[in-house]
Amino acid sequence: MWFASPDEVRGRLTAVDYLADDGIATSVFLAGALGKPLLAEGPAGVGKTQLAKAVAEATGARLIRLQCYEGLDEARALYEWNYKKQLLRIQADDGAWDDIFSEEFLLERPLLRAIRSEEPTVLLIDETDKADVEVEGLLLEILSDYQVTIPELGTITAMRRPYVVLTSNATRELSEALKRRCLYLHLGYPTPERERDILLAQVPGLPASIADQLARTVATLRALELKKSPSIAETVDWAHTLLALGRTELDEALIGETLGVVLKHNSDQVRAAKELGLPSRS
């Protein structure tokens, strides 16, 4: 049992500076209680990846991360053979052909490493929607039976099921087969009040008045039609920026000077300056 109740989830995540609302706490609890993967979906920068890290930290579990990307294949996600070492063995001993497909030559990748782990493990499959559709097929066996089949070695079944978190920015629709195996959690941008609390938890020494100003300013920016809305992590960076500058008030001049901390496209900065009544930017 990973957590005894949603209330315990909330308390243990808060202790590692991750503020979970009721929906998050319940989903995290159920994923552990039911032994089902948790699919966290939402815009970039709302705390999906950080949630998996927080679960690992709160439970003292080992975190294993598979970062998905276009072109990711089985060799990088699951396992591959150490061909150089196999070749050297054959060159040294012509009779070694029967021995080169053994544990000695197996290179574990994140999925196999998580399945074979004997200690509590959180498996983070990050940005699943960036991987090719074929990778989803690879995940189906693993998330259904928590086992991996290696032709040369047979079927390896998890001795201890990992706690699995998949994240998606919803850049493409994941397959229904994959979704059926998961509990679903949608994470959106936090309310200004909750983001203020996040800032106070993650930025020691930040005055409450500044945290409130930052949270409300970021909420205003997210309401604009921007190429890339500010993430929670960028809001935290903005708070650290103000502390580094020794500033205790977020006025228009300071917003204009530091806007590049949260907005990384010139067109977004120009739009924000216009909407916020800041000095014009070229």
Image (cartoon, helix red, strand yellow):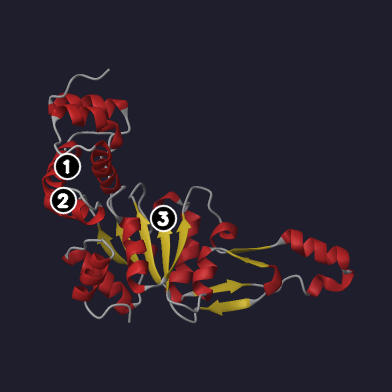
- The residue where tag 1 is placed is 214
Residue 67 coordinates in the image, percent (x, y): 46, 55
Mark 2–mark 1 contact, CB under 8 Å? Answer: yes
Count all numbered tags in the image, as a single digit. 3
Residue sitting at x 21%, y 71%: 11
Q: Is residue 70 left or right of residue 122?
A: right
Residue 205 coordinates in the image, percent (x, y): 21, 51
Give the camera-side residue of 161 and 279.
279
205 versus 271 height, above or below: below
> Where is the C terminus found, in terms of image quarters?
top left
Dot 2 alpha-carbon crowd within 10 angstroms: few under 14, some 14 to 19, many 20 or more: many
Give the camera-side residue of 122 and 62.
62
Distance (Cα) linking label 1 and label 3: 31 Å
Dot 1 alpha-carbon crowd within 10 angstroms: few under 14, some 14 to 19, many 20 or more: many
Q: Secondary structure at mark 2?
A: helix
128 versus 212 height, above or below: below
- The residue where tag 3 is placed is 128
Outermost residue toward the front in this view: 246
